[in-house]
Amino acid sequence: MSYTFLPPAERLKMKREYRVRVAVVFLFFISTAFIVGVGSLFPAYIYSALEERLHLNQVAAFKKTVDASAITVIQNKLSNSSVLLGAVSDTLQQNIFSTMINSVVALKGNVMINSLGLEQPTPDVMTIDIVGVAPTRSDLLSFKGRLQGLSSKETVDLPISTLAKDKDVVFSIQVNEKL
């Protein structure tokens, strides 16, 4: 605007007026965008309000139609189930498998265990299947003796056919323990 013949005070007024006009136009577009946004969300609000009302009516109708005796039967079954679960959880020993594995591994000596399987066919019996390789027959027999000494309620089954070899004896032992 330096090419105009306006005095500097008038030029400053004109710049200020242009800035105000730009701000007004900017605010107009912002308010228009806000109104369009609200207008586009209004149908979704109406739809969600109708759906909420519909579901609340369905719940109220369901509460009216449900037989009170059916609810009490279900509550009794749930309470019986919780009592049964409490009794079962009290009788189960949580760390019995890890305790058995630790005790067998502690007794292995120089016998190499290839696989170890634990099974609990009944709540009072645990079966342990041990497969491995013993350096000598005497090492295998001493391992069997250590397993028998683990508990007085154990039976250790070692097939006699595994004792045919004197060195590098591949074995499979089954230990049955009463809990």
Image (cartoon, helix red, strand yellow):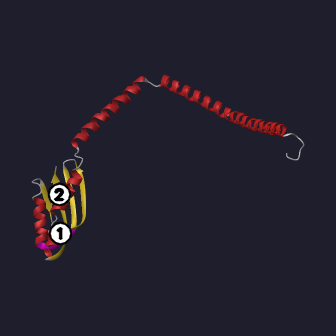
Identify the residue at horizontal 44%, vertical 24% (top origin).
Answer: 67
- Left or right of 149: which side holds 74? right
> Residue 132 location, x and y as percent?
21, 68
Q: Quadrant of residue 106?
A: bottom left
Marks 2 and 1: CB-CB under 8 Å? no
- Left or right of 48: which side holds 107? left
- Report which residue position mark 2 lands on: 103
Q: Quadrant of residue 157?
A: bottom left
- Report which residue position mark 1 lands on: 111
> Are there few (<14), some (14-19), or many (20+) residues within 10 Å of tag 1?
some
Give the spatial CA distance, label 2 vs label 1. 14 Å
- Give the magenta-colored segment's residue range: 132-137
- Left or right of 35: which side holds 58? left
Residue in the foreground of this view, choosing between 1 and 100: 1
Q: Secondary structure at mark 2?
A: helix
Identify the residue at horizontal 24%, vertical 55% (top origin).
Answer: 119
Q: Quadrant of the N terminus?
A: top right
Identify the residue at horizontal 90%, vertical 42% (top origin).
Answer: 5
